[in-house]
Image: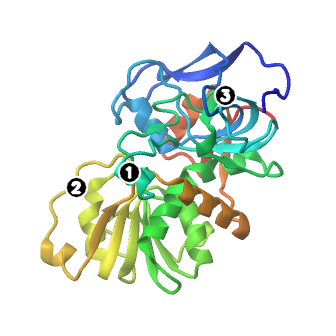
């Protein structure tokens, strides 16, 4: 695959981080950059849509270590293959629809990669952090870490599946819950609303706690069995499992106390504030478990995308232009969104 869909422009628009720190109108800036060239094993992708994830907010605000050089966020990328670099294996043809997710590349050589746990790789690279992401008209991606997508769907509805969906799926799968059991979701946004859809399709009861009135209404409309206002709101029944999506470690003791015997709490954020000390008898005894969820493997993404397609698990979205990426991040940070923020970048 060496041909292009059409002649490529020499430059592109991107929304780059202008200032790391608390989000403000000067956090991002629109600038022009040369269209990148794919290296060995890489493909050049014309971006159609890119989801706006809370991890992007952590990158911009410096909650994750600030890396040297320019940062272009975005790791829920749906695009079209336009060019392949040397040594590609032919997984995709020019014009194919692909998804580019957070895990840009894993080393493949460390003990974790060798045993199939590439999400724990010792030297991973991440899209929109180590490598330029989808807040741009084009990006380069590792062919081996891209997902094939159908071109018949709206790309803005596919984009949130590539991080909010994948990490939510991994957290739900790690819980081990089955039909008839009770799941608590703490914080209700992009990932949680997809997990709610998935859990209900599996026959679970789902209880949601969210501080935002808009999000509580969203959870009710999405089919939650019960909705509470804050961490002091105890679910009507003990929980077999819970997922914490809010980056608020202070919620952990209360959630652990709400778990039934043998229950599990999974923290699904890449960044969570400090967790207070736990009372052993009240919050850990009876084999309760506390576990983090770290990134995802390519197999997680493959299984989730197949499941979402087969069950029609479609996200609710709010669409912004690429130039409005800062506004989308602000709406996310202020909990003004009902639905997932997605940048529409190009036309399919």
Q: Position of residue 258 (x, y in %)?
A: 30, 76
Disc 3 target residue: 86
> Which quadrant holds residue 228?
bottom left
Q: Considering the image in quadrants, where does the N terminus appear?
A: top right
Q: Where is residue 132 in the image (x, y as percent from the top left)?
A: 54, 27
**Is disc 2 surrounded by few (<14), some (14 to 19) or many (20+) residues within 10 Å?**
few
- What residue appears at the point 70 percent right and 70 percent down from the top-left corner? 311
Q: Which of 336 and 267 is in front in this view?
A: 267
Disc 3/disc 2 C-alpha distance (Å): 47 Å
Q: Is residue 211 left or right of residue 30?
A: left
Q: Considering the image in quadrants, where does the C terminus appear?
A: top right
Q: Position of residue 136 (x, y in %)?
A: 64, 27
* Colouring: rainbow
Q: Nearer the viewer, residue 25 or 262?
A: 262
- What residue appears at the point 55 percent right and 53 percent down from the top-left corner? 298
Disc 2 target residue: 275
């Amino acid at each position: 695959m060496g041909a292009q869909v059409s002649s490529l422009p020499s430059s592109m628009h991107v929304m780059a981080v202008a200032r790391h720190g608390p989000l403000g109108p000067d956090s991002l800036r629109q600038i022009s950059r040369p269209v990148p060239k794919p290296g060995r094993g890489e493909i050049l992708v014309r971006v159609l849509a890119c989801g706006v994830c809370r991890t992007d907010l952590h990158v911009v605000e410096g909650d994750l270590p600030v890396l040297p050089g320019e940062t272009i966020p975005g790791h829920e990328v749906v695009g079209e293959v336009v060019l392949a670099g040397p040594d590609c294996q032919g997984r995709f043809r020019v014009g194919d629809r692909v998804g580019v997710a957070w895990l840009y590349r894993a080393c493949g050589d460390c003990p974790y990669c060798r045993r199939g746990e590439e999400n724990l790789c010792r030297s991973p690279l991440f899209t929109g952090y180590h490598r330029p992401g989808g807040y741009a008209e084009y990006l380069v991606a590792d062919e081996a870490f891209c997902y094939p997508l159908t071109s018949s769907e709206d790309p803005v509805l596919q984009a949130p599946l590539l991080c909010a969906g994948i990490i939510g799926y991994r957290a739900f799968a790690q819980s081990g819950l089955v039909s008839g059991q009770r799941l608590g979701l703490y914080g209700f946004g992009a990932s949680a609303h997809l997990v709610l859809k998935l859990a209900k399709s599996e026959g679970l009861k789902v209880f949601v706690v969210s501080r935002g009135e808009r999000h509580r209404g969203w959870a009710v409309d999405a089919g939650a069995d019960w909705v509470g206002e804050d961490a002091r709101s105890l679910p009507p029944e003990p929980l077999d499992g819970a997922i914490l999506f809010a980056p608020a470690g202070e919620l952990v003791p209360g959630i652990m106390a709400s778990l039934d015997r043998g229950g599990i709490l999974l923290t699904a954020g890449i960044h969570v504030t400090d967790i207070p000390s736990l009372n052993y008898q009240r919050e850990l005894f009876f084999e309760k478990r506390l576990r983090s969820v770290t990134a995802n493997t390519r197999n997680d993404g493959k299984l989730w995308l197949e499941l979402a397609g087969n069950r029609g698990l479609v996200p609710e979205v709010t669409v912004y232009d690429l130039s409005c990426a800062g506004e989308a991040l602000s709406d996310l940070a202020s909990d003004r969104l009902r639905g997932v923020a997605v940048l529409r970048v190009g036309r399919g």
